[in-house]
Every structure is written in C-alpha cells, then in structure tokens.
Image (spheres, grey):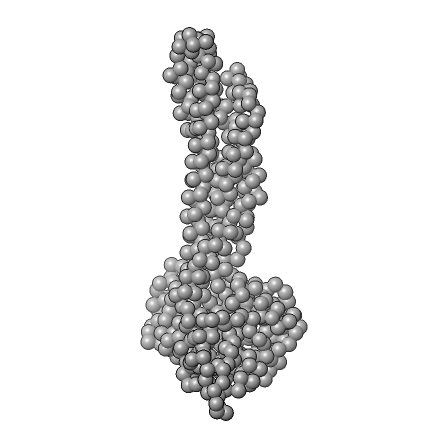
Amino acid sequence: MGVVSRSVGNAFRNKVRSGAVVVILAVAIGLALAMLVANQAVGSKVDSLKASVGNNLTVNPAGSRGGLGGGNPLTTADLTKAAAVQNVTSATGTLSVRLSNSAATTTSGTTPDSGRGEPGGRFGASGTTSLESAVAPGTLGQRNNSNGGSSSSGSTGGSTTTPTFSIPIQATGVSTSTTATGTAINLTSGTALTDFADTSTQALVGSTLATKNNLKVGSTFTVQDRTMTVTGIFDAGDAFDNNGIYLPLAATQTLTNQAGQLSSLTVVVNSIDNVASTQTALTSALGASNVDVTAGSANLQSAISSLGSVQSISLIAFIASLVTAGLIVLLIMIMVVRERRREIGVLKAIGASNRTIGVQFVLEAMVLVVLGTVVGAVVAAFSSNPIVSALVAGNTSSGNSASSRAGGGGFGAGGGAGGGGGGFTRTRGALSGANQLIGTISTSVGWQTLVLGIVGILLIAAIGALIPALLTAKVRPIEVLRGE
C-alpha cells in the first residue's frame, strides 16, 4: 500500500501541472473513444444496410442510364415474369417521369428546335404540372438546354432571346409507400399514400418543392388536367431530391399515357447467397438484350462506400489518438523522472529496488490516465454524435459530388424527343440518394465500447510510462548524494 499511496500522492504533487496533463489527456482520450464509438456505429449501419437491401436486384432497360442511352420501357408483363423467377420473394415496379411547369411552357412564345431542350424545362418532359421547380438551372442548365447561341428565332419571326430554362420536376410512380430501394419514404408531415388506383389524386411532395410552392398537407396542385392533393411531405436528403413528387404508379401511367410501362424493377431475393444465380435467371427470363440486371443499387453502393471511408478515417483517428496519449504520458514521465533524481537516489540508498521505484512511476502515470479517461468519456459521450454526423456528411457529399461531375451536363444536348422515356432515374437516384439510405446514425458509449477503449488507452499509457520508469535503473545513489 505504501507504493500505491505514494504514487497517488505524487500524481498531485504539482496540482497545476497535473491538472493541465489531465485536461490534455482527456482531449486525446475523448477523441479516441469518440472515434471508436463512431467506428462501431458506422459498422452496425453497414451491416444493417446489407441486411435490408443487400439482397435486392435492380432491373433497368438495356443501355439506359439516367434518362440517356437506348432501351425500351419495361412493362407490367416483365414485372410478372420477374416475380415468377425462382428465389424471388417480391418484385415492384416504378415509373419515373419529368414534369414541366405548365405556365412557363404556354407563355414562352417560341417553337422548340427539334433535338434540343424545349422552353420552360420541357426537355424529356412527359407532361405538365402547376408546380414551379424549386431548383434553379444555373449556368450549366441554361447552356445545356438552350436552343443554341444567345438568341433564337421564335415562331412569329424575328430574333428573340432564348427562353429561360426551368428544371423539370421529377415524378416517381410507386405501387407502395416505399422508395425504389425498398426503404420507407421519410415523411416529415402528413401520411403515406393509401390510394393506388389509376384515378387516385394523392401525392407526396418533397420539402423544398413544397416550400417553393407554399404547399402543406391538404394543399392541391395539378398534374396534366388532374387536381392532386398533398397527403404528405417528405425529406429525401438534399434540395435536388426534394424537388420531386411521389404519385401512385397507376395514376402516373394514366396521366402520362404510359399504360403498362415501367422505368425500373426492384426485385428482392430470398437470400443473399442466391443473388448471383437469381441475377442470371432474371437476365435469361427477361432477355439479355432487353434488360440490365444489377445487384443492389447505386445508392447502396454509394452509401456503403461512403460509410467504409468513415470507418477507415475513424479507425486511423482512434489509433492516432491512442499514440498521442502515449506520447503525452512518455514526455511527462521523462520530465518527472529527471526532476526526481535525488528522490530516486535516496530511495535506492535505503534499499528500494528498481522494480519498486519503476512500479511507483507507472502507477503515478496510471492515476493521471484514469482521471483523463473519466473526463474523456464525458467528452466522447457529448461529441460522438456530432463527429460521426460530420464524417458521414463529408464523405457522402464527396461521393455525391463525384457522381455529379461524372454525369454532368447529361440533361443537355440529348434532345427533347421521346419525352416518356426521359424520366429514368439519374445517377444519384430520382428522389432517394445515399443520404436518405444512410439516414441518421445514432451513437452511444456502451460499456463494451468503454471497456475496449479503456483497455487500449491503459495499455498505451503503460508503455509510455514504462520507458521513463526504466530510466530509474540508471540513477546511481552515490552520484546523486555526492552532488548534493
């Protein structure tokens, strides 16, 4: 008990320095624990995503990506064939279309050039709506969807300014109140769709689109000549994805004169182990020249990739924080050993062994580390959620930016023909992106995480304290006493 009591007393011999050391250690240890918690929370989210949508297959028209390329629309007959394939537990279809603003279309006063974007945002549009887009086209949108040059000739003759382009509104027809990936639509107010008949007037509206058009639950707007009622408002993660609406599938097909047509199919396989064989069977059943069958979804791959980056960053930060804590202990204890050479010499002179003296300094370091760990655990409890949110947001935004650059300008020079086929999902997803798929990641400092973190911290601290403790063996009592 003499060694332990001396160690505890020595730890607070210089209260100012000990307090400063505890604070510095608390920051390093708190960051280490927060990163460990973030790593485990993200790992759990990845497992959850793989379990929920990892056994999904996506069927798109062959050669069609983001509304560009070839391919013919899928049909309800294809949906029936897909549902009948062995190991398929369910198959659902969606129809994605673009709707232009009806007022902008009728007041533009020009005749669109063949093969170019039409005024009022009618590039690839399948119909019109009274809603006004909440997303401005910007320089790229105007450039890619102009009728060429800075001016064009209208149908009435003479030179007129190119009409302002308006971003089309994405509309996705669904047969259930879930996204194409099978996840529930994230409603912020109102209720989900309940009427899926072709005469349905229900609609879910994105939050930014609702704000732009002063809509709330119960408000009405038109699609083609039908008055739709807002039953709910959703949040899909960003302003572009929230510039859209969900409509019942049958109603969307009727309103856009695309009866029986689908943009894509989402097929759920009974087991992850059967995904590869079912993918082959689907391709064979629907025709390799007619469809492209991909495992999972682009959003899932993007989400898992982003979360994988977060896991790597948090693991590296955890290790770096542990090493930092060890270096802090090492430097402090080297300084302490040098300050107490006379005390070490006296202890050796009265018979104390190197082992006893070394243990005393290690225990002294452990006292400071334990105090730093207690404070650090509190820091981690309050900081882990903001840290993991910032890491996930940063990595997901980077991934989305890369996707946007890869598919930039895709709405432009392709031409306005084939409006019905122009609504196939874009690279990041028509209304649901990686952000929505990931959702909110909640962290908690559980006792298992705390024990694992503390064991790692104490191990690093012990190594940091052991080196200075070994320096006590070099202290010779006769030299110290002679110098006094």
Residue at the image point whose x is 47% and y is 17% from the top: 340
- Answer with left or right where residue 30 lies relative to residue 478: right
Quadrant of the drawing holding the C terminus: top left
**Quadrant assignment, res 468:** top left
Residue at the image point whose x is 39% and y is 20% from the top: 471
| Relative to 361, residue 389 above or below | below
Residue at the image point whose x is 47% and y is 19% from the top: 339
Q: Position of residue 473 (x, y in %)?
A: 39, 17
| Relative to 56, residue 175 above or below | below
Nearer the observer, 182 or 395:
395
Q: Position of residue 77 (x, y in %)?
A: 43, 79
| Relative to 419, residue 8 above or below | above
**Quadrant assignment, res 338:** top left
- Answer with left or right where residue 149 lies relative to residue 2: left
| Relative to 196, residue 26 above or below | above
Residue at the image point whose x is 33% and y is 76% from the top: 289
